[in-house]
Image (cartoon, rainbow, N blue to C red):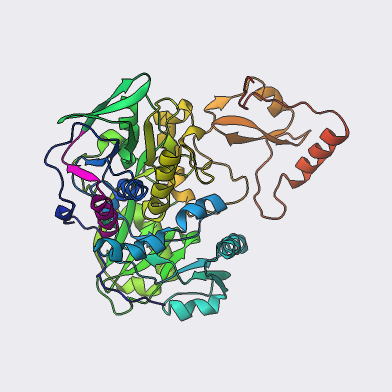
Amino acid sequence: MLSAMTAPERLANRDLDSSILEPLSEPPDRARIVVIGGGVAGSSVAYHLTKLGVADVVVLERTRLTGGTTWHAAGLVAQVRGTHALTELSRVNAPLYESLPAETGVETGLRRVGALTVARTRGRVEELRAGLSMAKDFGIEAHELTPQEVRKYWPEAEVEDLVGATIFPQDATVNPGDAALSLAKGARDRGASFVFGVSVTGFERRDGRIAGVITDRGTIECELAVLTTGLWTSELARLAGASVSLYPAEHVWVMTDETPVADERLPVLRDLDGYLYVRHYRGRLLVGAFEPKGKPKAPGDIDTGGFVEFGEDWEHFAPVLANARERLPVLRDIGFEHYLRGPESFTPDANFHLGEFPEAPGLWIAAGFNSQGIIFSPGAGKALAEWIVEGHPTMDLTEVDIARTGRWANNRGWLHEKTSETLGRLYAMHWPALQPSSGRGLRRLPLEQRFRDAGAAFGEAAGWERPAWFEPGATEEPVWVYDFDRPSWFGPVGEEMAAARGGVALFDLTTYSKFLV
């Protein structure tokens, strides 16, 4: 399963040599497109713009290449996501990372080690089978495994509590910093310029459009600008009068001491029900977490100097570590060499933001990747570049379009509360119509109490509390019970549909958009 390799594994690389980009000592006076942010997303946008023939691109970075969040990514490369549209964006990642070294001369460290995901419940097995179906649609190799077959790939794994598993043999790991540098080198070779140590302080407008980027070292006139600034994107968007619903949270992985059980041929192991993943790294094991209750962090509390770490917090990590030791009992006897806790940005619906700001024409975004920047940046950069050049999306981008959210979703207190839950929902069960438990009641209907009195079960959509179904005569609000076959609303919704088709129904359209034609 393990492919031939020419570059050693490199994570948390603070010493990336970007001199091969021949960065400018001062920002230019003018560029057609200014990309703000020098992580993997910004590098990908610049790479794909230049590949489409737009060479007059300048990339601005406040610190050094990858200094925001790319540098501490775990380097997981998964090709299948939860929907066809998202998989269309993610499936290009491994092929691009694999082909870049021959094009740019910069190794990315891609290793096709595969990815193994285990299931502790029947519901999780059903969810994993949906991933197998998605893989089949895109021609990506994937197989279902029995619990006993898991040990073929991870001999040290405990499997007695498992119900099933899947293996994606062509998934991979990559060196995050090297991948970003290789993308940047491809952009540089086709004419893009890079400037480090420059901060954006504002934007100029002309005829209602972005016409310039103001920096602490002068103004750059431009036709458009792209924000690829991760957790700081909302702060920069405000300078242009635009709104972004994303918020930072702490993100953690820990690295063990060297151990003989850390075989470089081990696939990435995901135990989603345990909120963890494990990968090999230089003769060690790396355990990462998407814990159920994350720790949001206000943007103003995060140092802007780059390569930020917050220090150890073993108490918060303890439940995930306990789950990891259940899955891999060998971890009980291995010490830990490094605890990395750094910043990452998350969005309320766990989808990233892409496209042009409706309230700031000429200002574009590719940010809020929910700790999946390595997975999505190749496809997101390609999609955004095509959108800019063609003047319209070249694929279905509805799920990630920045226009899907309004200013209501940039409420700081609401985002802080939501982010605590959003981080963990990445590995939680993705039930149909799954409802959030946090950030509820932001927007309410005038008739809410009357609906409650009528036995409504309330769900949330775009911040609105609105009836999902009714159970007439109920003395308490109906409970959401999730299932892939017959969830709690299965019967009531069927009755409501029959009543609407055979009689008369009244719909409250308060929460729907209205268009004057």
Q: Which residue sits furthest front?
A: 53
Residue 267 in the image, given as x and y percentages of width and height: 41, 72
Give the tally of numbered discs: 0
Q: Is residue 483 above or below residue 148?
A: above
Residue 182 in the image, given as x and y percentages of width and height: 27, 58
Residue 320 is left or right of residue 400, and the answer is left
Residue 398 is left or right of residue 512, and the answer is left
- Report which quarter residue 477 is drawn in: top right
Residue 250 in the image, given as x and y percentages of width and height: 33, 47
Q: Quadrant of the N terminus?
A: bottom left
State the residue in front, 405 or 285: 405
**Point 30% across, 26% down: residue:** 211
Q: Quadrant of the C terminus?
A: top right
Residue 52 is left or right of residue 187, and the answer is right
Q: Is residue 195 magenta?
A: yes
**Residue 370 in view, yes or no:** no
State the residue in front, 371 or 100: 100
Q: Is residue 438 magenta?
A: no
Residue 358 in the image, given as x and y percentages of width and height: 45, 28
Magenta stretch, residue numbers: 178-199
State the residue in front, 407 or 157: 407
**Point 37% across, 42% down: residue:** 367
**Point 79% across, 37% down: residue:** 496
